[in-house]
Image (spheres, rainbow, N blue to C red):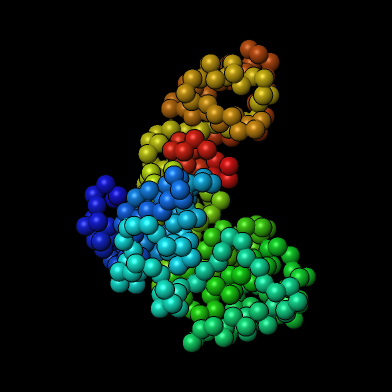
Amino acid sequence: MVSDGFHYIKRTRVREVAGYTWGVAPILRVWELRKSYGPVRAVDGVSFSVEAGTIFALLGPNGAGKTTTVEILEGLRVPDSGEIELFGEKVTKVGPAQKARMGVLLQEGSFEPYLRVREVLELFRTFFPKSREPEELLDLVGLKEKRKALVRTLSGGQKQRLALAVALLNDPELLFLDEPTAGLDPQARRHIWDILRDLRAQGKTVFLTTHYMEEAEALADWVCIMDHGRIIAEGTPAELVSRFGPATFVEFELPPPAFPELSDRFPQKVRQDGEKAVLQIEDLAQDLSALLSWASSRGLSLRNLLVRQPNLEDVFLALTGRRLRD
């Protein structure tokens, strides 16, 4: 998409989203966006579009430039150059008119610790000409029983859910979420996923960054992977994963001293993840037999062996050589 230029990204794509075939116009377009800090090019010619009523995920390792990109789109920073089209209008800087139609959950935020939970929502709703009812939002994010609790008494996960409620106060058309499920337990994380799917079903647009690859794979209609200030790959999660073709992955625990020999036996096919080895194989029967024979000849037990298909994390590692959280 990037290589085809601005005329391509301005087209309306027709794709299947949440079981329906939609012809969706972009709510956000970015073309050749750039931002430097001295000699460092944090954002170096980034182009993409976000369709209305979808969940869009921007992924990348720390230092890739995604935070600077998102902060520009939220109106927190001004780009050095490039074009932004938001809600159908070109803007040089995201201003109050656009912000009134957006919701933002920052990666790091804080509320006055001696306010009560409902008081936080009552305070922030005064910033908008229209707003949703605080009780409705507290129920939505699972904090209704905490409405009278002081912010200082909330757990990290509860504060994150409160931040999501604040981001939804003005009933935004476009919602920016930076690590929305950070610090949440698995049950609460799935609850947030359900909320985001419901928002998409209502025609809202979600712009998501996350450190959880399974979250992007489960939620996103479109994924852009960013590194060194540029978009290096994009597509649906299924399209990106399909680039591995017929490959299969075998995971197992292995004593670290055995990794060099395993790498020699399967060059270019194995990577180390702590005490776990991840082996990419093309012929399941032949390569798995060779692996088991190698382990048996050395008296090694391949504990917790798992055979699986490629996933979005494999794509990310193949493209960047790093884990998203590194």
Name the residue rendered at 65%, 63% in the picture: 188
Residue 111, quarter of the rendered image: bottom right
- How many discs mark residues in the rendered view? 0
The image shows residue 218 at horizontal and vertical percentages of: 50, 55
* Residue farthest along the front direction in this orientation: 38
The image shows residue 92 at horizontal and vertical percentages of: 34, 67
Q: Is residue 99 above or below residue 43?
A: below
Name the residue rendered at 23%, 49% in the picture: 4
Name the residue rendered at 43%, 70% in the picture: 174
Name the residue rendered at 50%, 55% in the picture: 67
The image shows residue 314 at horizontal and vertical percentages of: 49, 39
Q: Is residue 267 visible?
A: yes
* Residue farthest along the top direction in this orientation: 297
- Taking depth in this image into account, of 145 and 283 the one nearest to the observer is 145
Q: Residue 151 vs residue 12: left or right?
A: right
- Taking depth in this image into account, of 304 and 198 the one nearest to the observer is 198
The quarter of the picture where the C terminus appears is top right
The image shows residue 264 at horizontal and vertical percentages of: 53, 16
Q: Is residue 254 above or below residue 191?
A: above
Q: Is residue 189 visible?
A: no
* Residue farthest along the left direction in this orientation: 7
Q: Residue 153 vs residue 260: left or right?
A: right
